[in-house]
Image (tube, grey):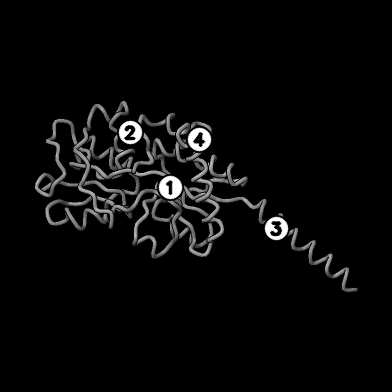
Amino acid sequence: MNMKTAIYLAAGAALLVSATAAGAEVRFGVMNEAYPPFFAKDASGKWVGWEIELMDAVCAEMKEKCSVVDMSWDGLIPGLESKKFDVIWSSMSITDERKKMIAFTDKYYNTPSKLIGAQGGVAGTTVEDVSGKTIGIQVSTIQSDYYKKYYASAASEKTYATLDEAFQDLAVGRIDYVFGDSIPLMTFIHSDFGKTCCADMGNVKDDPAILGQGIGGGLRKEDTELLARLNAAIATVKASGKYAEISKKYFDFDPYGE
């Protein structure tokens, strides 16, 4: 093999690798339960919702083919680390504790944390308000960490694999509160089922060190190129008006927050 042929073959191989990388599918990890209005499966089994539409817009901006991989909430970070998918796109709060394990995109929405309880209950979220009560919390969430710091001395915690299970127990009186992100909790309260049983008790006092700095996509720390591309795409989707267009289908407010 002469030198010129070797150079052509090397160049061809480089182009093939580049084309393969460019055409590679970006896999987005989503929790395998309905979390309206952010994501849920429709009657055909297709993932739909605000977060899915935003994902599609971001992927279109990056000119990438994307797919959804679903698994349990507490399996998302291990699944990312074991390369079962490439991006956690599942309403995960950006916290300093999680940053020790994974990298995050810029935030793409924000939501405070709140308590909901039975209708007729007295609104309030202080330690005195919850004293002697049982609080339902989804396992491995920022709310569980918040409970341990602020409420554990006064109230009991009951953990759940899914928010739906907590909602069911609240509705029949097995627990006194559900503690979680405000948007899905308010979506439940406004549902046909939720409005017959449950009410808003109020937002808890913010603690950014625990509750985070908004919601972002999670990546392996070494995937710096994909992180940069995702951040650029999120910024473009927001600046172009596409973010607002998608959001108006689901919210009567701007989910991006401050």
Question: What label sits on residue 90 in the rendered view?
Answer: 1
Question: What label sits on residue 18 in the rendered view?
Answer: 3
| Residue with the most extreme bottom position | 2
Q: Position of residue 154 (x, y in %)?
A: 12, 53
Q: CA distance from mark 4 to mark 1?
A: 20 Å
Q: Is residue 39 above or below residue 89?
A: above
Q: Which residue is mark 2?
A: 187
Taking the spot 74% from the left edge, 63% from the top edge, the residue there is 14
Q: Residues within 10 Å of mark 4 (few under 14, many from 20)?
A: some
Taking the spot 56% from the left edge, 59% from the top edge, the residue there is 225
SS under mark 2:
helix
Q: CA distance from mark 1 to mark 3?
A: 29 Å
Q: CA distance from mark 4 to mark 2?
A: 23 Å
SS under mark 3:
helix
Q: CA distance from mark 3 to mark 4?
A: 30 Å
Q: Which residue is mark 4?
A: 242
Q: Amino acid at mark 1?
A: Ser
Q: Amino acid at mark 3?
A: Ser
Question: Is 210 left, or right, of 55 in this rendering?
Answer: left
Q: Based on the displayed image, in which of its 4 quarters is residue 21 positioned?
A: bottom right
Q: Amino acid at mark 4?
A: Lys
Q: Nearer the viewer, mark 1 or mark 3?
A: 3
Give yes or no for contact between labels 3 and 4 (Cβ–Cβ under 8 Å).
no
Q: Position of residue 201 (x, y in %)?
A: 19, 38
Q: Is residue 207 above or below residue 243?
A: below
Q: Position of residue 104 (x, y in %)?
A: 44, 56
Q: Based on the displayed image, in which of its 4 quarters is residue 33 positioned?
A: top left
Among the two numbered marks 2 and 1 on one chain, the one whose residue lies closer to the N terminus: 1
